[in-house]
Image: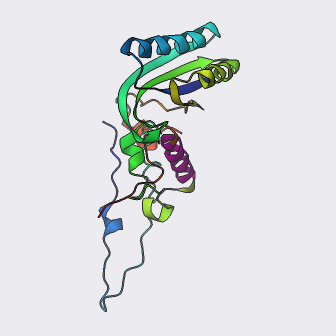
Amino acid sequence: MPRRFERDDEHHRMERGERGERAPATKKSCRFCGNPFDPIDYKNERQVRRLISERGKILPRRATGNCAKHQREAARAVKYARHLALLPFVSEFHK
Amino acid sequence: MQTYETTLILSPILPEADWEAKAAKYGGLITSGGGEIKKKETWGIRKLAYPIRHRAQGYYVFFQYQAPGEVPRELDRNIRLDEDVLRHLTVVSKRVPTRPVPEHPEMQAKGVE
């Protein structure tokens, strides 16, 4: 079986130093670079939904950890999906 | 020749027989223009993420086809005239690398660009 891409947990954990200061942020690796067989697809609603915020905005690279190339593809995919009404342009959220 | 993908959202108020008739009509337009349909998917009635022309649902049909460049242009022109199509999108299909055979684990590790 091909390796499933998994985000390294190490990158998420915020390690605290002795005086409680944050450890320097570790580089996240782009999840789409890790698996070229499962590219970003505007038709895959489940996948594209992960690229937007609760509000329906496109998540920035700092949140997704995508590389520049895949962030461009991701943004494109979200826009296609919005056009096809698979994703909302705005989602009102009710608290 | 390029490979294209076209998705149509048909009006949900059409009689059931018309959905397939419409899909067949546009499929026919692809083949008559010298294209070859590689994949046709019917996603059926889906809820729309936002209303389009006051409709909350739509009937989705998806085509993937290899065709000369005039085909998507002609298809687009025809779809625009059709009031029963709520929305449509044509894009150039992305080339997806095929998974290597599982007998070569080194190939998987390297991946295919």
Task: Give B42 or A67, whichever is nearer the viewer.
Answer: B42
Residue B109 falls in image quadrant: top left
Residue A95 falls in image quadrant: bottom left
Image coordinates for residue B46, horizontal then vertical, percent:
36, 32
Furthest residue to the top?
B32
Residue B30 appearing in the image: yes
Image point (39%, 40%), residue name: A45
Total tally of numbered discs in the picture: 0
Point out the stretch of residues depicted in magenta. A69-82
Furthest residue to the front?
B54
Image coordinates for residue B68, horizontal then vertical, percent:
68, 17
Furthest residue to the right?
B70
Residue A41 appearing in the image: no
Is A34 positioned to the left or the right of B75 in the image?
left
> Does A77 sit above or below residue B1?
below
> Does B81 sit above or below residue A49?
above
Q: Main secondary structure of the magenta part?
A: helix
Q: Is residue B72 magenta?
A: no
Image point (68%, 23%), residue name: B73
Image point (33%, 67%), residue name: A12
Image coordinates for residue B85, horizontal then vertical, percent:
52, 25
Image point (30%, 70%), residue name: A13
Is A35 positioned to the left or the right of B67 in the image?
left
Q: Quadrant of the N terminus of chain A?
A: top left
Task: Give B55 or B40, whichever is nearer the viewer.
Answer: B55
Please say which color scheme the image uses: rainbow
Task: Give A88 or B38, whichever is nearer the viewer.
Answer: A88
Is B75 positioned to the left or the right of A27 in the image?
right
Q: Is residue A78 magenta?
A: yes
Image coordinates for residue B94, horizontal then vertical, percent:
55, 33
> Does A24 sit above or below residue B45?
below
